[in-house]
Image (cartoon, rainbow, N blue to C red):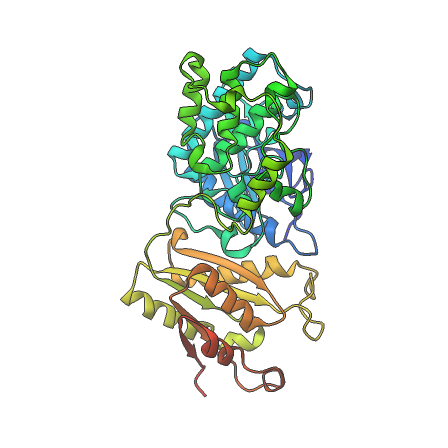
Amino acid sequence: MLKPEKGLTVDGFTLGDQLHEGGFATIWAVTHPLYRSALIMKVPKILDGDDGPTIVGFETEQMIMPRLSGPHVPRIVAEGGFDTMPYIVQEAIPGQSLQARFDKGPWALSDLIETAARVADALAALHAQGVAHLDIKPANLLMRETGEVVLIDFGLSRHRDLPDLLEEEFRIPMGTYPYIAPEQVLQTRGDPRSDIFALGALLYEMATGKAPFGMPSKMKQLKKRLWLDPVPPRFLRPDLPEWLQEIILRALEVDPEKRYQTAAQLRFDLAHPGQVVLTARGRKLRPDGWLTIWRRRRKMRGLTRLGATWAKADVPILLVAVDLSPEGEALHDLLLTWVRRMLTHQPESRVALVNVIRTALLGIDTGTDAQGQNVHVSRLVALKHWAAGLELPEAQLTFQILENSDAAQAILDHAGQVGADHILMGARGHSTTRRYLGSVSAKVVAEASASVTVIRAPG
């Protein structure tokens, strides 16, 4: 797999200067003979270690961004797969993100209202297209010269009509901790009201110069927002009007049902302060006392879920475990035949393809293979190459590379997470590994809650 560097040409795009390096991706200026406008290329940082979150997040962006339109999202020009070099090329939007302005402290009231209204407009447009962003923060907000706020970085997003790769693979809260909503802490993804909570956190920071819940870095700190209300903004900045505090604290309600239900509603209140109905939220001047906090914490103890998520399509899910090792090659064509056969009976089925990297097993499957390639990436490329024979549309397929020392348990766990209705897998012939460690297929058959079909190569 190619690595990005200045002067490299990929699919006609020539890389110029590196514009930015983040934790998960690098951004490059690029040119192409067919395009006159300024372009940038985003390339995920694939290292030699555990790159699962980076890879799945980038795949999520590649699935969602081409389906979006309008001035509030970047225009996508081209994409590249992991077989050569993964990338997304999009229009270059001049200027910096809003992070630089947030770093300067509290905003003037007029600037605050105007900018927050534009962010609300962007969220309303995004939600209307069936997408929850789920990582709204100053660094992910750009401003066009025409005034529209542009949302970027969709690696944690959820599309209403597409499989949620992140929910299927990772069981930890995902988001930027100072802005993440309580339901995201409890691992509920896909509720657009999570973005409204994040907008409330932005509003609070714009008004006071401080994040409403500080800058947590640990899960224990993150969970406090389930019961700990932020200090009232007017306690920190007495000149703020009650109506604005009402809007901010309503957006920051723990229970999504008590927040604004749409970004358009919040936008309307910002534009019509005289019509904002004041409650105790807007008049509050002091932080909560210890007894109030204790009672709220006791009430929230044991809470495991908040919010809602878009219902998954009521279609069968066929999980196919593909063995990409040399020993599994004999089953590849037969496995394809069986998948096609099953799809003739239920053609609308979603096919979840998985391969397992067996970690800490006899010293095999470390971060890189014998050729120095990232194992996760090489397996993903091989899995997609195998799936090309199915000729299925992108929205009907998902690809997951699982990591576990117990391959059978990895398949069982994933089948439970995605709600698989049927598991299809191959069984190898006799081998020393199988003799001493047991049969993967036998364990899956014995313990799976779904029906299981196991196939063998003839002879």
Residue 318: x and y in percent read: 39, 65
Which corner quadrant holds the C terminus? bottom left
Residue extending furthest toward the front = 291
Question: Could one spot residue 26 in this view of the protein?
Answer: yes
Q: Where residue 265 sits: x, y (%)?
A: 40, 25
Query: Observer-nearest residue: 261 or 29?
Result: 261
- Above or below residue 199? Residue 238 is above
Q: How many discs appear?
A: 0
**220 sits to left or right of 60:** right
Instruction: Depth check: give the residue in front, 439 or 78.
Output: 439
Quadrant position of residue 237: top right
> Up-down: is 416 above or below 288?
below
Whether residue 146 appears in this view of the structure is no
Q: Position of residue 5 (x, y in %)?
A: 69, 41
| Depth check, front residue: 454 or 340 | 454
Q: Is residue 128 left or right of residue 54?
A: left
Residue 59 is situated, as x and y percent measured from the top left of the image, at 52, 48
Looking at the picture, tell me which residue is in the foreground, 231 or 141: 231
The extreme left residue here reads: 345
Q: Residue at x 44, y 61 (%)?
A: 352
